[in-house]
């Protein structure tokens, strides 16, 4: 009887260890929307830029999911821009502002979209400013849809806004700025 109980104990222990290991491995390959966007909040109305930076940092596993330090520092700053994070290294990730150009008919739209495509193909996300009904808002470009459009997410509080016509919005605005990032090789 003791031997059967011991074997049963070993089987249960092995099962628990196997399940814990499987769950850990599953979490290493999480989905950006389900894991990052759904668990993130924009805590101040004007903190869209640091909120998007935080989402990228969380996606890159540079910070934990309770990280809101950038927004807490920014708070209600209304004169901020992508320039505040240009060439800034945070937790082993360097952010770069791109396409700081006049928004007119000479804007290099094809170059912008090619840059975004290249970033997405390399497994990265792109932070983008988009002109929506309420003014300019900050989004994270998540993926390219089968029809070639770009899908982008933004947060306002815990509410998630999903845009499936990002390219169309950029074209109507005659261009926009983006932030890309690189991960330090010594991290």
Image (cartoon, helix red, strand yellow):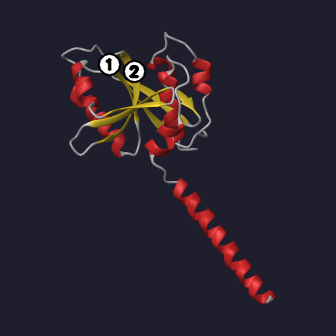
Q: Position of residue 93 (x, y in %)?
A: 53, 35
Query: Residue 168: image x %, image y %?
Result: 23, 27
Q: Which residue is mark 2?
A: 137
Front-lying residue, 160 or 150: 160
In the shown orientation, is residue 20 left or right of residue 166? right
| Viewport quadrant of the C terminus | top right
Tell me, yes or no, if residue 115 can be seen here. yes
Q: Is residue 86 visible?
A: no
Question: Toward the viewer: 93 or 33?
Answer: 33
Q: Which residue is denoted by mark 1 in the rendering?
A: 131
Q: Is residue 22 left or right of residue 127?
A: right
Query: Residue at coordinates 37% horizontally, 45% vertically from top-left?
Result: 122
> Are there few (<14), some (14-19), or many (20+) residues within 10 Å of tag 2?
some
Image height check: is 163 above or below 22? above
Task: Tell me which corner region of the image, top left, top right, bottom left or bottom right, holds residue 138.
Answer: top left
If you read the primary sequence from the N terminus, does the residue marked by circle 1 or circle 2 appear first? 1
Q: Position of residue 119 (x, y in %)?
A: 36, 39
In this picture, residue 42 sits left or right of residue 13? left
Number of numbered discs overlaid on the protein picture: 2
Q: Secondary structure at mark 2?
A: strand
Please give the name of the residue rendered at 46% of the width and 18% of the height, measured from the top-left corner.
83
Residue at figure coordinates x 45%, y 16% from the top left: 81
Q: Quarter of the image holding residue 164?
A: top left
Query: From the image, which quarter does the N terminus lie in?
Result: bottom right
**SS under mark 1:** strand
Packing grade of label 1 (10 A; few <14, some 14-19, many >=20) is some
Query: Decide: marks 1, 2 in contact (CB < 8 A)?
Result: yes
Label 1, label 2: how far apart the Cα atoms are: 6 Å
Tell which residue pokes out farthest to the left in this image. 105
Q: Residue at x 55, y 59 (%)?
A: 25
């Amino acid at each position: 009887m003791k031997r059967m109980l011991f074997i049963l104990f070993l089987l249960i222990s092995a099962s628990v260890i196997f399940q814990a290991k499987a769950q850990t491995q599953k979490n290493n390959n999480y989905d950006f929307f389900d894991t990052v966007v759904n668990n993130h909040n924009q805590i101040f109305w004007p903190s869209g830029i640091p909120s998007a930076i935080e989402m990228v940092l969380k996606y890159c596993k540079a910070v934990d999911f309770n990280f809101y330090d950038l927004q807490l520092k920014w708070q209600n700053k209304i004169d901020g821009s992508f320039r505040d994070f240009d060439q800034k290294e945070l937790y082993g990730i360097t952010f770069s502002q791109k396409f700081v150009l006049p928004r007119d008919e000479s804007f290099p739209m094809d170059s912008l979209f090619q840059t975004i495509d290249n970033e997405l193909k390399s497994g990265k996300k792109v932070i983008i400013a988009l002109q929506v009904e309420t003014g300019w808002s900050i989004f994270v470009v998540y993926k390219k849809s089968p029809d070639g459009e770009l899908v982008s997410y933004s947060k306002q509080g815990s509410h998630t806004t999903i845009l499936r016509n990002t390219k169309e919005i950029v074209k109507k605005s005659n261009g926009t700025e983006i932030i890309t990032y690189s991960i330090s090789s010594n991290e």
